[in-house]
Image (cartoon, grey):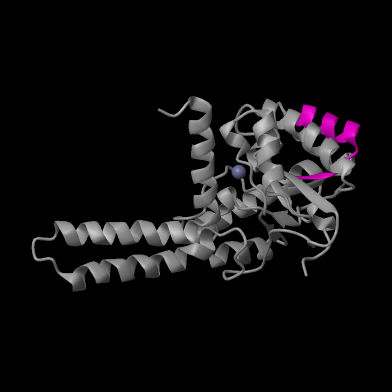
């Protein structure tokens, strides 16, 4: 039997493989389901099984650009900066919250700038923290109003989330945000267009340590380092749950990358990718 630590390493490895090869995982998955439907079909119709396989592949191909954080098919998104410069952008979603103050302290003490993608409803709850983040040189962007997954929603509902989220930040800061990150990174072609009509460019990420799973500060840092590349936009969270591990991980990550000569910049300061 596997020991718990070996089991967790194994689960991490499988999760990483699926994350990095999700197109292949999807094809394997729908292939297995089509095969199962053929095996269970009393008539053993190959045509039917192939039809299911082809339909699932077509649906997958249409949905892939909605969830692929690097895909530009449904509109331009910023997912990383130049791979030639020793720059990195920390981004924090779902806040502000009771953890944002500690995070701002860490960023100030370690000399790093970051980007906060705030929820409109949280910004109205903690307006002082949003103003403090901006006053200390960080960039404030919008992460919608209440963090509804925009996938599966009609364009009017998506527009409402985008417009009210930006309006809340305007109420707090006195100006509209220029940057938008859709909840879960999911978007339809019109999501990016609606953000653009509200004056915002869409930002996603290239490095995601899944800090919301609260695996411990050390693991959060290890996950970032394992897949780290210059110009990365790192997805972290300062709201939506207990973020004390994220606050600790950020301090050690900044020290580690500072020693390697990296500069922590806002997403609007990243050199464009080649
Ligand atoms: Zn979020």
Give percent across and percent down for residue 145: 61, 45
Foreground of the two, 132 or 216? 216
Q: Does the magenta stretch include residue 109?
A: yes
**Quarter of the image that includes the N terminus:** top left
Among the 4 quarters of the image, the one containing residue 49 = bottom left
Give percent across and percent down for residue 69: 60, 58
Query: From the viewer's perspective, is residue 75 above or below residue 221?
Result: below
Query: From the viewer's perspective, is residue 210 above or below residue 56?
Result: above
Left or right: where does residue 129 sit relative to residue 54? right
**Quarter of the image that includes the C terminus:** bottom right
Q: Tell me if residue 168 can be seen.
A: no
Foreground of the two, 54 or 139? 54
Residue at image x 69%, y 43%? 224
Query: Which residues are drawn in magenta?
Result: 100-118
Ligand 1 quadrant assignment: top right
Among the 4 quarters of the image, the one containing residue 26 = bottom left
Query: From the viewer's perspective, is residue 19 above or below residue 64?
Result: above
Query: From the viewer's perspective, is residue 258 above or below residue 271?
Result: above
Q: Is residue 99 magenta?
A: no
Q: Tell me if residue 261 can be seen.
A: yes
Residue at image x 55%, y 67%? 189
């Amino acid at each position: 039997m596997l020991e718990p630590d070996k089991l967790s390493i194994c689960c991490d490895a499988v999760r990483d493989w699926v994350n990095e090869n999700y197109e292949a995982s999807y094809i394997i998955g729908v292939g297995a389901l089509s095969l199962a439907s053929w095996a269970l079909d009393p008539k053993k119709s190959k045509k039917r099984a192939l039809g299911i396989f082809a339909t699932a592949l077509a649906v997958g191909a249409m949905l892939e650009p909605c969830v692929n954080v690097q895909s530009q098919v449904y509109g331009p998104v910023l997912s990383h900066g130049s791979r030639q410069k020793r720059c990195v952008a920390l981004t924090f979603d779902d806040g502000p919250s009771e953890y944002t103050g500690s995070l701002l302290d860490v960023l100030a003490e370690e000399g790093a700038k970051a980007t906060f993608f705030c929820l409109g409803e949280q910004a109205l709850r903690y307006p002082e923290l949003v103003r403090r983040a901006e006053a200390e040189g960080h960039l404030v962007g919008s992460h919608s109003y209440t963090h509804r997954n925009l996938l599966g929603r009609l364009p009017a509902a998506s527009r409402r989330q985008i417009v009210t989220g930006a309006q809340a930040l305007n109420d707090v800061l006195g100006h509209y945000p220029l940057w938008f990150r859709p909840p879960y990174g999911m978007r339809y072609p019109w999501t990016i267009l609606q953000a653009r009509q509200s004056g915002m460019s869409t930002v996603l990420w290239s490095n995601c340590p899944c800090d919301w799973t609260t695996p411990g500060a050390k693991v959060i840092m290890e996950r970032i380092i394992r897949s780290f590349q210059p110009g990365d936009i790192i997805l972290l969270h300062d709201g939506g749950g207990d973020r004390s591990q994220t606050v600790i991980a950020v301090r050690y990550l900044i020290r580690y990358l500072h020693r390697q000569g990296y500069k922590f910049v806002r997403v609007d300061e990243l050199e464009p990718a080649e």
